[in-house]
Image (cartoon, rainbow, N blue to C red):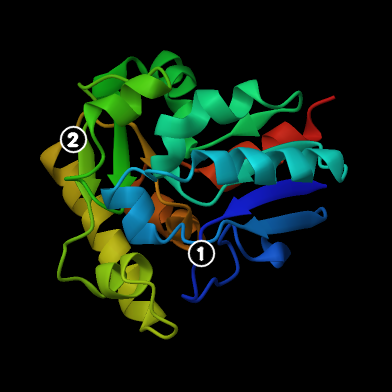
Amino acid sequence: MLGILMLDTVFPRPLGDIGNPQTFPFATRLRKIERASPEKVIFERANGLIDQFITAAQQLQAEGCRAIVTSCGFLALQHHQIAAALHIPFASSSLCWLPTLYNAFGGPAHVGILTASASSLSDEHLAALGGSAATPRAGMPPASEFARVIIGNQVEGDMEQIHAEMISAALGLVERHPEVRALLLECTNMSPCAAEIAKRTGRPVFDLVGLAKQMMTAG
């Protein structure tokens, strides 16, 4: 069973999203962290919430989860504190992929990150998990439907438009940085669009959903 530390959200979670149990071929157990809104985690660095995340992770571990992930890549800053409190595998963010992707694709310049907020995804977030400031990044526009629904945490939204915005951002990233050979989705809510992004950009796409599956099949 995979444990998932969920932000306190109400927005839609289509198939492929880490918060949709049908995304995985194995059982999942979701644990919501009260007051951990997208805005609180992305823009306020989850200030004051670390103890809640640790307690919830330990509960999931005690309930028999074999591995634990979160539902937001910006929790990279809290990774080591949470991981140190567990004895099962833990991945706070898809950014955990970065050292492996650098080795696989020839260095930081060849791995592009698509993020919910480029202004908030700092060099510190990357460095927390072995990433480099030289990694190209592209974020979703502040005026986008993605920002309104996902970051703004709205019950309803135009998911087709959101997917189109994600594809557009990915295409813009590889156009500005043609040296990019692989894409990493920081935001777990981008995963439903991963296959289409890979098809449209011609680059392999990595995300936290894939990492979670790998963690669960190990051993």
| Residue marked by disc 2 | 178
| Left or right: residue 135 compared with residue 33 | left
> Which amino acid is tagged 2?
Pro
Which image quarter: residue 199?
bottom left
Position of the C terminus, as image quadrant, is: top right
Q: Residue 205 location in percent, x, y? A: 44, 43
The quadrant where residue 6 appears: bottom right
Image location of residue 73, percent across then percent down? 43, 43
The crowding category of the residue bearing disc 2, from other C-alpha atoms within 10 Å (few below 14, some 14 to 19, many at least 20), is few
Q: Is residue 24 visible?
A: no
Q: Residue at x 83, y 47 (%)?
A: 1
Label 1 is placed on what type of residue? Asp
Q: Is residue 196 visible?
A: yes
Task: Report x, y in % for residue 9.
Answer: 49, 69
Give me the disc on residue 207: none
Q: Which residue is mark 1?
A: 8
* Rendered residue at 67%/46% (across/down): 56
